[in-house]
Image (cartoon, rainbow, N blue to C red):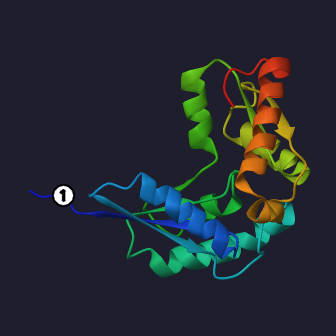
Amino acid sequence: MRRKNMKLLLINPNTSDGFTATAQKAADAFKNTETTVKAVSSPCGPLTLEGYFDEIISSVGVLEMIQKEKEEYDGFIVACFSNHFSIYAARQLTDKPVVGIFEPPMLLAKQLGAKFSIVTPSPRWKPLLEEGLEAVGMQGDCTGIRVIGLDVKELECMPEDRLEEQLLEESRRALAEDGAEVI
């Protein structure tokens, strides 16, 4: 019996088409012949998520998209590096899997080393990440959250090599000063 092609909807909870295009490009890089991933922007909400307010507002668009597409797709990915509020509510809308992109990299980090650190652009994200770590039971595994001092909206405009250098610089500090083994 031939297995059905799995269709996943990757929802960018903000309305930035640039971030959505980047997410689609990343999904296409890992695509296989039995899985199709379609990235979409939220139909409403903030251009970028800069903190609690934006995250809560963005949940409306994520939930609207899942409600609209729940019969069409086999699962949903909320593409926000936080313990996004919409994930829990979306699981009440559908019996299909709804996952975020926050917990999986930390689970992988735990397989690669004893302790990890998180490097994030915006200082406004630090409290959300701390709460997210606690919610998924990984606060004891994280040696620290490092901030490079950018708003999320600045990421889209910044040259990739400059952003990469800032992230690497802060990552090196986390390795040297925090005792992290994985970033």
| Residue 144 higher or lower than 152, as above or below | above
Which residue is found at the position 69% from the left and 57% from the top?
84
Which residue is found at the position 71% from the left and 42% from the top?
135
In this view, the residue in front, 18 or 39, is 18
Q: Is residue 31 left or right of residue 88?
A: left
Visible in this render: residue 96?
A: yes
| Residue 57 higher or lower than 115, as above or below | below
Which residue is found at the position 77% from the left and 73% from the top?
57
Residue 113 drawn at (x, y percent): 61, 19
| Residue 73 higher or lower than 119, as above or below | below
Q: Which residue is mark 1?
A: 3
Residue 64 drawn at (x, y percent): 59, 79
Visible in this render: residue 49?
A: no
Instruction: Bin the neighbour count of mark 1 within 10 Å (Cα to Cα): few under 14, some 14-19, many 20 and up.
Output: few
In this view, the residue in front, 65 or 168, is 168
| Residue 40 higher or lower than 156, as above or below | below
Q: Quadrant of residue 61?
A: bottom right
Residue 66 drawn at (x, y percent): 53, 73
Q: Quadrant of the N terminus?
A: bottom left
In this view, the residue in front, 74 or 96, is 74
Q: Is residue 23 left or right of residue 175?
A: left
Q: Quadrant of residue 32?
A: bottom left
Mark 1, secondary structure of its residue: loop
Which residue is found at the position 60% from the left and 29% from the top?
109
The kind of residue tagged 1 is Arg
Residue, far left: 1
Q: Quadrant of the C terminus?
A: top right
Residue 7 drawn at (x, y percent): 36, 66
